[in-house]
Image (cartoon, rainbow, N blue to C red):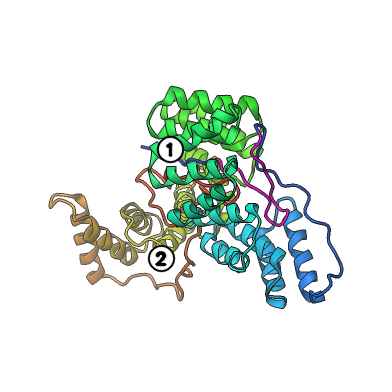
Amino acid sequence: MISLRIGTFVPALAAAALLACGSSPSSKPTAPPAPPKIEKVVGIPDAAVRSFNDGISAVEQTPSNFAAAAVAFEAATTAYPTYDAAWLNLAFVFGKLGRHAEAVKAYRKVVDRGNVPKAVQLDFGRALMSAGEVEAAITEFESVLRAQPTDLGARNNLAAAYQRKGDMVTALRYVKEVLSIQPKNVPAIINLGLIYLKQTKLPLAVLMFTKAQGYEPKNAFAANNLGLAYFTLNDVPGAVEQFEKAIALDPSMDEARLNVASIYLDYLDYTTALLQFKAVRARFPKHYQAMVGEADALYGTAQYEQAANLYVESLSIRADNPEVLFRTGKIYEEQVNQPKKALSYYVRYRDLVKPEPNDAIHSTIQFLEQADTLQPQPKEPESAPPAPDSAPAPASAAVPESTPAPASAAVPASVEAPASAK
C-alpha cells in the first residue's frame, strides 16, 4: 500500500523580500526579485554586506543554491550579529533546506528583539509548525489575529496548524471564516480540500483542488494534492499526471517528487524513480525516505553495491527498518558475495522481527553460521560508509524527520507542509 505526501498550502508573506504572498483570491507563493545588492550600508561592516550579497546571488541562481546561501547568510550574521535582513534570509533558506529547527532559531534572533512586522511573525509561526512545535505556532498565529482581527492569512495558517494537530473541527471553522469573506481564496480552498481528503470525502477533495486549479492553474500545491486524491481513488495515471505537473510548476516540491517516484517504484520503473529520488537527495542528502527509495531503485537497476552502501547509511538514521535490514542481507548474500556481512544483517532482522519458528530466515542464518566456521570470508572493507547527519525534512513538506518507509518502497507519509518552508 503506497502512502503519499500531502502539501498543505499556507499563504506566505514577505521574509526579507525573498518570498511574498497575500491573502487575495489570487494569492500564491512567489519568489519576487530579491532586494538589490548594495555595496555599503551605514553601520554594517562591509564584510557582512558582501556575505549578504553572496547569499542573495546563491538564491537567485537557477536552481537556487540554498546550501551556499545558508553559508553566506551565516557569515553575514557572524560579521554583524544584529543584521536582521541576514537572519530572516537565513531562516528562509534553512526552511528550504528542511532545517526547520535551525530556521526557528534564526527567526528568534529577530523576533526576540520585538516589534516585528506581521509578515515575520507569520513566517516564524510557519517555521515553528514545520519544526513540530504546533502549539507554539498556533500561539503566534493567534497573536497576529488578535492584533489584526480581519487578517485572512493568520486564519489560513491557523487552519493548517489545526490540521497538523488533528483538530479538523477547528481547522474547518477557520477555513469557513476565510471563505465567507473571500469565496475564491485559493489557500482556504486547498486547506478545505485537505480536510475533505483526511475525512476520506474524496469527491469533495477532488472538487476543491480542481477549483483551486481553476483559479490558479500554476498552483503546485493544488496539483500535488489533486494527485494524492486521484491516487486514493485508484486513478494512478491521473495521479502521476498531477504529480508531474506539480514538479514542472515547482521543481523544489519534493512532496510531488517523492509521491511520483513511489508510484514508479511500485510499478517497477526503477530508472525513472531513481531520477526523482536523486533530485530530492541533491538538495537533502540525508533525507531518509529519499535515501531508502534511491537504494530500492539502485537495487532494481542492478547497482547492488551502491544500493547496499545506501541502505547501510540509512540504517544510521533509522536502525529498526526491517525491510532495509533484510534487503541489505540479501544483497550481501546473493549479489556481492559477502556472506559474513549478510549474516550480521539477517541476525539483526531476526532479532527485530522475531519471525515464526518455521520462517525461512532461521535456516538461512543457520546455513551462513555453519559456512562461516568452514571457510574464510572475504576481507572486510577498511572503512564503512560515513554516518549521516540527522535527516532534514523538505516537506511537507517540506519533509518530516526520519519517517519510516513501507515494505514496498521508500514511500513518503501523509504530512502537511507550509508553502514557504519546505
Tell me if residue 275 comes above or below residue 184 in the rendering: below
Please tell me which residue lies in front, 202 or 384: 202
Q: Secondary structure at mark 2?
A: loop
Please tell me which residue lies in front, 417 or 322: 417
Quarter of the picture holding the N terminus? top left
- Compared across the picture, whether 422 is left or right of 413 comes to right
> In the image, what residue occupies the spot 66% across and 37% down?
27
Rendered image quadrant of residue 312: bottom left
> In the image, what residue occupies the spot 55% across and 34% down?
178
Tell me if residue 69 comes above or below residue 135 in the rendering: below
Where is mark 1, residue-wise?
266
Tell me if residue 136 comes above or below residue 225 in the rendering: below
Q: Mark 2 vs mark 1: give the one in front.
A: 2
Query: Which amino acid, by three-letter code, is at mark 2?
Result: Ser
Residue 67: mark in rendering: none
Q: Main secondary structure of the magenta part?
A: loop
Where is mark 2, residue-wise?
316
Q: Is residue 12 magenta?
A: yes
- Compared across the picture, whether 5 is left or right of 111 comes to left
- Is any part of residue 210 visible from this angle? yes
Badge 2 density bin: few <14, some 14–19, many ≥20, Cα 10 Å: some
Query: Which amino acid, by three-letter code, is at mark 1?
Result: Asp
Q: Is residue 388 magenta?
A: no
User: Marks 2 and 1, Cα distance to the nearest angstrom?
Assistant: 25 Å
Residue span colored magenta: 9-24
